Image (spheres, grey):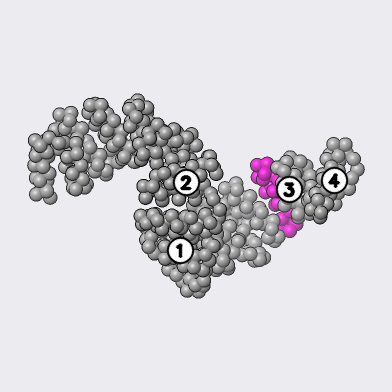
Amino acid sequence: MQEEYKRKEERELIRKFEAFLKNKESYYFDEDAYLEVINYYQNHEKYSKALKACELGLQQFSFSLDLTMEHADVLVKLDRHGEAVDALATALSFHPNDPELLVQKGTIHALMSEYAQAIECYEQTLEFAEDKDEIYYSIGLAYQGMGDHRKAAESHKKAIECNMLNENALYELAYCLDVAGELESSLDYYHKFIDQDPYSEYAWYNLGIVYNKLTQYDKAIDAYEYAVAIDDDFSSAHFNMGNAYMNLLQYDKALNSYVKTMDLEGPTAETYCHIAAAYEKMEQFDLAVKHYQKATKLDNLYHEAWYGLGVCLSQKERWYEAIHFFNKALKLDVENGAYWKAVADAEFKTGNIISAIDAYMEASQLDPENPHIWLDWSYVYYEQGDFEKAQETVEDGLVDCAECPDLYYRSVVYLIEGGRYKMAINRLETGLMLDFDGHLQLFEFFPNLQTQKALYKIIEQYRKNN
């Protein structure tokens, strides 16, 4: 009843304001009324009308800080950032130490990538601000924008010192230390933090993130376990624990963690995809398909789910269906080299050679450092008996993957098939130098005993000399 009365009052106020704009009817609006009108238009994304209300309100209440801040906010929504800064600067000339004005001005400078000015504004508020942790956190984000992750990390540490429960600062600190190459040193920081507050689930959680980035997955899981022991409803900790279990190839445990995440957060496309991926790794492809489909029903723009469907159907050798889903993923993420390669592989399996080659070409341009693209693309030509074209493709791959032994070994195959033995021996020696045991793959291509004996002779000679 009270809500309905408030809505009725709001509708009447907006009617009066619009009549005032249209017919210049003489209505008086106090400051609170202007703020209510502006808020209404902002909520309905009618920013031009909100701006008009701001301007009219400031004509009557020139020194209103609330109207000035709303005015700046509306100008930002209209992409008029410079005017917003000017409006706040004028207000600051009358109220130079107002923390809310300074924070808002700093935020707009940050949106304009004017990070030094943003930091200057934030720092001016530190003496007066109540939530100093949020100010330090904003300074940290500004330093991140500048690319100075070490200074950003120091600011986030100060935020945490002010408020140990600042989850955002704890998370960004781990990220900044990672980018700055100081993850190892951050372990000491988090352990000291935990010594002071052993019941901080966020500290344990971020310690888990650090261990995860250091590929110490067992320790990451231990840290996440502490986090969920403190707060069993900590869904992010359960989710990241699932990722760590996936990295340890413990797919059943990963699945349990993802299911727990969904119990806490409700179903999301991302969680369904991770559940599907766990089933996929366990080769339970029907269950994987079922969960990828659930992800697409929740969000049909979630391209990872369409791609996952294609992968599962490829495993079941349902190539045409796989191509259909790979193409759906590509429409949503056309610059994904992995998706183009998946299309290429499937097209090759169906005998669509031209389509496969076109897709491999796209994949190679988007992800030239992926040696599997060059290996599989060259194999298409090899299967057609075009050894020269196969060799040219490998040569192109070696431009970006010069340290990949598999490309050198594959080059040996194509050169021998093309009768270019001297160059084949040179490539074989390079392959042996990079990965001696990798030479075993050659014999999959050469069942002929005479050729195998010749290769063994060269390989054994290399072994003796090295």
Q: Mark 3 points at which residue?
A: 71
Residue 12 is marked as 4
Instruction: Label 1, secondary structure: give it.
Output: helix
The percent position of residue 239, horizontal first and vertical second, equals 48, 56
Q: How crowded is mark 4: few (under 14 residues within 10 Å), some or many (20 or more)?
A: few
CA–CA distance in space, label 4 to label 2: 50 Å
- Residue at the extreme bottom of the image, as rendered: 196
Q: In this view, does 199 lie above or below 134?
A: below
Q: Determine whether, in the image, residue 355 is placed left or right of residue 98.
A: left
CA–CA distance in space, label 3 to label 2: 47 Å
CA–CA distance in space, label 3 to label 4: 23 Å
Q: Is residue 48 visible in this depiction of the protein?
A: yes
Q: Name the residue under label 1.
A: 224
- The nearer-to-camera label among 4 and 2 is 2
Instruction: Specify the segment rendered in magenta.
Output: 72-96
The three-letter code of the residue at mark 1 reads Tyr
- The nearer-to-camera label among 1 and 3 is 1
Query: Residue 454 colored magenta?
Result: no
The percent position of residue 267, horizontal first and vertical second, equals 54, 50
The three-letter code of the residue at mark 3 reads His
Whether residues under marks 1 and 4 lie with C-beta atoms below 8 angstroms apart, the answer is: no
CA–CA distance in space, label 1 to label 3: 45 Å
Q: Name the residue under label 2.
A: 291
- The nearer-to-camera label among 3 and 2 is 2
Earlier residue among tags 3 and 4: 4
Q: Determine whether, in the image, residue 150 is placed left or right of residue 281.
A: right
